[in-house]
């Protein structure tokens, strides 16, 4: 009997493929783990020899996994922001680390690139605009109140 003649053949076929791929991934992960354990010195030397390459690949992976953007998209965003933080306008070259990708935690929509300080401000305020407005009021009204 041809499997395509039976009901839901496509769903069962795709499920079989998915299960096989998952099994292959598990076997590959186990093999890789064992190989790395047996070849610690080679792994260590590769890490030393390819430090910059690994850093770039890690950055690419993190951007894609966390925010769903490519390194090219990140670079375009940075260029649109004139290589400056979206909030304080400090140029990128004034910082040691890359700008953080600011995103809405509810929708996961990317909003812009921020320096570490500006990203922390939003994070500590829990992206709550009323807290940030109160902070602005405080800064504007409390000048020299302690004598």
Image (cartoon, rainbow, N blue to C red):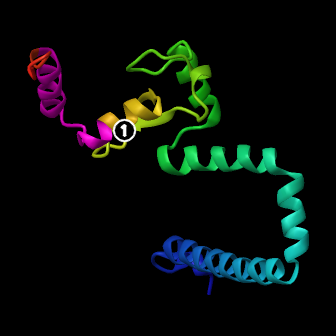
**Rendered-image quadrant of the C terminus:** top left
Q: Is residue 102 magenta?
A: no
Is residue 110 visible in the rendered structure shown here?
no
Looking at this view, is 17 or 83 the one in front? Answer: 83
Q: Position of residue 78 (x, y in %)?
A: 55, 22
Q: What's the residue at 13%, 16% (across, down)?
A: 144
Q: What's the residue at 90%, 53% (across, down)?
A: 49
Q: Give the overall secondary structure of the magenta segment.
A: helix
83 in relation to 126, above or below: above
Give SS at disc 1: helix
Residue for badge 1: 120
Instruction: Name the residue furthest front.
Output: 147
Q: Position of residue 79 (x, y in %)?
A: 58, 16
Specify whether 22 is left or right of 131.
right
| Magenta residues, start to end | 122-140
Looking at this view, is 3 or 18 the one in front? Answer: 18
Specify whether 56 is left or right of 140.
right
Q: Position of residue 73 (x, y in %)?
A: 58, 29
**Rendered-image quadrant of the N terminus:** bottom right
Quarter location, residue 34: bottom right
Quarter location, residue 145: top left
Q: Position of residue 69 (x, y in %)?
A: 54, 38
Q: What's the residue at 65%, 74% (across, down)?
A: 21
Looking at this view, is 1 or 35 the one in front? Answer: 35
Instruction: Name the residue furthest top.
Output: 82
Q: Is residue 126 magenta?
A: yes
Circle count: 1
- Crowding near the residue tagged with mark 1, few <14, some 14–19, many ≥20 C-alpha atoms within 10 Å: few
């Amino acid at each position: 009997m041809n499997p395509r003649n039976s009901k839901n053949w496509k769903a069962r076929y795709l499920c079989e493929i998915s299960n096989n791929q998952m099994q292959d991934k598990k076997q590959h992960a186990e093999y890789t783990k064992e190989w790395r354990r047996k070849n610690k010195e080679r792994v260590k030397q590769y890490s030393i020899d390819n430090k910059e390459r690994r850093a770039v690949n890690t950055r690419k992976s993190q951007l894609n996994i966390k925010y769903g953007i490519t390194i090219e998209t990140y670079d375009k965003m940075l260029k649109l922001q004139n290589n400056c933080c979206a909030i304080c306008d400090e140029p990128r070259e004034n910082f040691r680390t890359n700008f953080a990708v600011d995103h809405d935690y509810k929708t996961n929509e990317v909003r812009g690139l921020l320096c570490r300080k500006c990203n922390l401000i939003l994070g500590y305020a829990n992206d709550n605009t009323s807290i940030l407005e109160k902070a602005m009021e405080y800064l504007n009204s409390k000048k020299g109140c302690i004598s």
